[in-house]
Amino acid sequence: MKPFTYARASSVQDALRLAGTTAGAKYLGGGTNLVDLMRETVERPDALIDVTALPAEIEVTQDGGLVIGAAAKNTALARNRTVRERYPVLARAVLAGGSAQIRNMATVGGNVLQRTRCTYFYDDAARCNKRVPDAGCDAIDGFNRMHAILGGSSACVATHPSDMCVALVALDAVVHTDGSAGSRSMRLVDLHRLPGGQPEVETELTPDELITAVELPQLPFAARSTYRKVRDRASYAFALVSVAAALDVADGAVRDVRLALGGVAPKPWRAWKAERALRGQPATRASFHAAADAELADAAGLRDNGFKIELARQTIAAVLAGLAGQRP
Ligand SMILES: Cc1cc2nc3c(=O)[nH]c(=O)nc-3n(C[C@H](O)[C@H](O)[C@H](O)COP(=O)(O)OP(=O)(O)OC[C@H]3O[C@@H](n4cnc5c(N)ncnc54)[C@H](O)[C@@H]3O)c2cc1C
Ligand code: SF4
């Protein structure tokens, strides 16, 4: 592992000051992803700025939403009473990730910015455009069972690994940041980029930009929401397909819906087309399948992952049917 310096920031201002005066620095959350990548020499920062002492509170906002400090641990988020009662999809998504020990270490900011689990990305003997721009991509013609069916490019077909982000994107989360150019807020759905010809550029953030909080708007019908993760093992495995959904049904029809997918795309995938197809339709299996078909119309399988298209279709329909109170 390359030598690096370490400093612990005492506040957001302190973190930004350290970032501005330390060349080659990266922020350090729980280190559950970054330190692994440093061991593999995929990440080679000169300095780490520990941001785990920054705000970690989870608080109801004046307009009834919820603000989550970026240093909040994944465990604290999943255990929070307001999250469990008002946004159960988020508690379930967080609990579907990693193991108890990892969730005890991992922070919300770090979870948002965790990097892909594409095995070629971790293997420095493999060609990977994300690790070495213009090197090529060994996944496209290689073993690509875990890779993307939506949103990939000829340069990269890696999936985004976060479960938490899928729920946050479904809930219209907003990310608050601070950096040398000042503070700003953006929708989480706009933070991660699709790979296009530049898979090494994964987000809209600038290098010194610090995530300070994630905010959820009030969404009363999210009390009826859930997360389902389909994976090879019941724990300690990343999603083949996951679905985050909240459903509002009145008089047998879909009044409103929020739907996002994980395990299928290079970013947490908001299923806008499925949502549009569903609003105002009868809350029936036929409508749920039609909505899934609308979302997946552009999906394309690679050599080993074509099964994900039907898996996603069935999982979307099953999750929505469950939220509508229908039998599986
Ligand atoms: C064995 C294993 C299994 C796992 N399984 C799952 C799973 O099933 N589902 C899942 O979703 N995840 C899974 N994970 C990943 C885990 O959720 C992430 O490693 C974790 O969320 C990262 O959080 P962290 O605080 O440790 O981030 P770190 O590793 O500290 O940082 C990750 C990145 O975020 C940046 N960063 C951290 N905080 C900030 C901030 N406030 N502002 C700006 N940048 C910041 C860092 O610079 C780094 O680039 C697994 C991890 C392991 C090791
Ligand atoms: S899919 Fe992306 S991350 Fe994986 S090898 Fe190809 S370029 Fe690298």
Image (cartoon, rainbow, N blue to C red):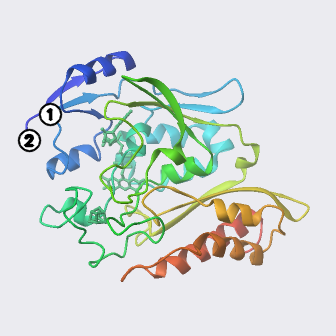
Please rate how many residues cluster around mark 2, counting C-alpha atoms within 10 Å: few if below 14, some from 14 to 19, many from 20.
few
The percent position of residue 184, horizontal first and vertical second, equals 50, 28
Give 121 or 96, whichever is nearer the viewer.
Answer: 121
Is 58 rendered above or below residue 130? above
Please rate how many residues cluster around mark 1, counting C-alpha atoms within 10 Å: few if below 14, some from 14 to 19, many from 20.
some
Residue at (33, 49) in percent of width and height: 201
* Dot label at residue 169: none
Task: Kindly identify the amino acid type of the residue bearing the numbered disc 1.
Answer: Asp
Q: Quadrant of ligand 1?
A: top left
Q: Which residue is mark 1?
A: 46
The percent position of residue 314, horizontal first and vertical second, equals 61, 77
The quarter holding residue 181 reads top left
Give 130 or 262, whichever is nearer the viewer.
Answer: 130
Query: Do the residues under discs 1 and 2 have CB atoms within 8 angstroms?
Result: yes
Residue at (56, 47) in percent of width and height: 168
Q: Is residue 32 left or right of residue 267?
A: left
Q: Is residue 328 visible?
A: no
Q: Earlier in the sequence, mark 1 or mark 2?
A: 2
Image quarter where the N terminus lies is top left
Q: Which residue is mark 2?
A: 2
Is 220 rendered above or below residue 275? above
Residue at (46, 41) in percent of width and height: 75
Marks 1 and 2, Cα distance to the nearest angstrom? Answer: 8 Å
Q: Is residue 53 left or right of residue 186?
A: left
Image quarter where the C terminus lies is bottom right
The quarter holding residue 74 reads top left
Q: Is residue 173 left or right of residue 248?
A: left
Q: Is residue 311 left or right of residue 37?
A: right
Give 93 or 100, whichever is nearer the viewer.
Answer: 93
The percent position of residue 30, horizontal first and vertical second, equals 32, 38
